[in-house]
Amino acid sequence: MADRHVCADVAGAKSSAVVRLAEAAGIHLSLTTFDVAHAPIVVAAYDEKCWCATLVEMAEVCTYAQLVDEILATANDVRLVGVDGFGGAGKTTFATRLARAAGSCPVVHTDDFATHDEPLEWWPRMLAQVIEPLSNGEAATYRAYDWVNRRLGDELTIQPAAVVVIEGVGATRKAWRDRLALRVWIDADSDLRLRRGLDRDGEELAEFWRGWREAEGRYEAEENPIAHVDLVVDGSPEPEPPDPEREFVVSSRPRAADAPGRRR
């Protein structure tokens, strides 16, 4: 079939995003709208046998600008945002785009604290040198790990700002999760994450990645971080949003029912 026409009800404020998503999948939508706050976007697929629309996925498309507005609505002077997830999920990409939408706000990477010998047990140093001072409105000073020369590098200073993104594996760990204005988990298929990692770092680091993923498994078993985030983002959406530099796909909001103000 050359054209597929589907009628769907969607939230009026997001109807244009539905059209763009559907067109990316080769579906032509005729829309009726209703006004429901935070209603999910309906992505429909055509059923040739029944000549009707079959709902196959419920997805929410948000912009990074909308997320920044949500973060700024919290009460803190310095709003720490944790962007967590396993290696290769797309955390750095998401954090970079979020920081750009927040006026090029500072980004602190957990990889600056992790080392070859301590993939995840670096957190006391980050707590003392970054989380605590920024939470108190003070500058954070630390020495980032040099992954090439396997030693601590030059000293870096992060000034307090309205939004500071903490990005990397362990960014929402329980030692400081209650100090975060927003907790985000980037989710992606395990095989895809490994392939992304090896494509980036080289096949010669396959053994390192094996050990790294074992450490991630311990982190997951001990802290179950995904259960404590506000937002789960799809790190490999199919299809992608029409403008991935500005938009992202939300998989779920695990703690949406807990509180309207997000920060507790």
Image (spheres, helix red, strand yellow):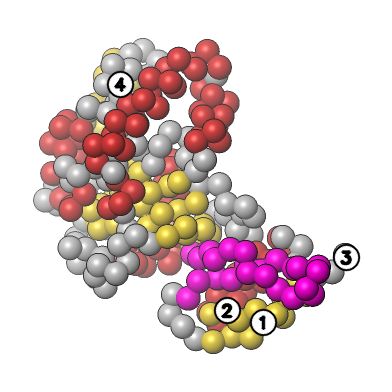
Tell me the residue that label 1 is attached to.
31
N-term-proximal mark, 3 vs 2: 3
Tell me the residue that label 4 is attached to.
115
Separation (CA) of disc 3 from disc 2:
24 Å
Tell me the residue that label 3 is attached to.
2
N-term-proximal mark, 2 vs 1: 2
Residue type at numbered disc 3: Ala
Separation (CA) of disc 1 from disc 4:
52 Å
| Quadrant of the image occupied by residue 1 | bottom right
Q: Are marks 2 and 1 in contact (CB under 8 Å)?
A: yes
Q: Pick the residue in front: 118 or 223.
A: 223
Q: Are marks 4 and 3 in contact (CB under 8 Å)?
A: no
Q: Are marks 3 and 2 in contact (CB under 8 Å)?
A: no
N-term-proximal mark, 4 vs 3: 3
| Quadrant of the image occupied by residue 155 | top left
The magenta stretch is: 39-62
Number of the front mark, 2 or 4: 2
Separation (CA) of disc 1 from disc 3:
20 Å
Q: Residue 10, labelled with which disc?
A: 2
Looking at the image, which residue sits at the far right?
2
Q: Is residue 34 above or below residue 233?
A: below
